[in-house]
Image (cartoon, rainbow, N blue to C red):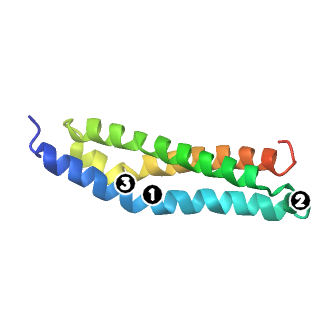
Amino acid sequence: MNEAGVREIFSDAIRYWERRRVVYNTVLVGVVLAVFAYEWPSSGTAVSLDLVLRFFLLAVIANVFYCAAYLADFVAQFSVFRDAWRRHRWVLLAVGTTFASIIARFASLGAFGSQP
């Protein structure tokens, strides 16, 4: 068994990832708002209840995908690389946020009338 207990590992992962979920969501909202502003005024005419619901659904899906970081974190923390992982797991956050931002950009361009 790993030096750290199961409870400590789960608590550490939750503490780390949940504090950063706000940053992740803020970046994604920023991408959508930037595309909205860039596509103005045509983006203003695209706004509808269906569009708001579509973005809500995408936000939920993005947060479900964010939870995939927990799986990687748990596996890494149960390995002999726990200490190195804890120092460098911000890389997973950066790569995941960048990937999600690219998806958000393409979804926003499609939603506001411009095709990438």
Labelled disc at residue 21: 1
Q: Who is closer to the viewer here, 77 or 22? A: 22
Q: Quickly name the residue at label 2.
A: 45
Mark 2: which secondary structure?
Answer: helix
Q: Left or right: 63 with respect to 33?
A: left
Mark 1: which secondary structure?
Answer: helix
Mark 2 → mark 3, Cα distance in angstroms: 37 Å
| Badge 2 amino acid | Thr
| Badge 3 amino acid | Trp
Q: Quickly name the residue at label 3.
A: 17
Q: Residues within 10 Å of mark 2 (few under 14, many from 20)?
A: few
Marks 3,1: beta carbons within 8 A: yes
Q: Left or right: 70 with respect to 6?
A: right
Q: Who is closer to the viewer here, 98 or 18? A: 18
Q: Earlier in the sequence, mark 1 or mark 2?
A: 1
**In the figure, 64 relative to 90: above or below?**
above
Identify which residue is drawn at 70% across, 55% down. 52
Q: Earlier in the sequence, mark 2 or mark 3?
A: 3
Q: Quadrant of residue 29?
A: bottom right
Mark 1 → mark 2, Cα distance in angstroms: 31 Å
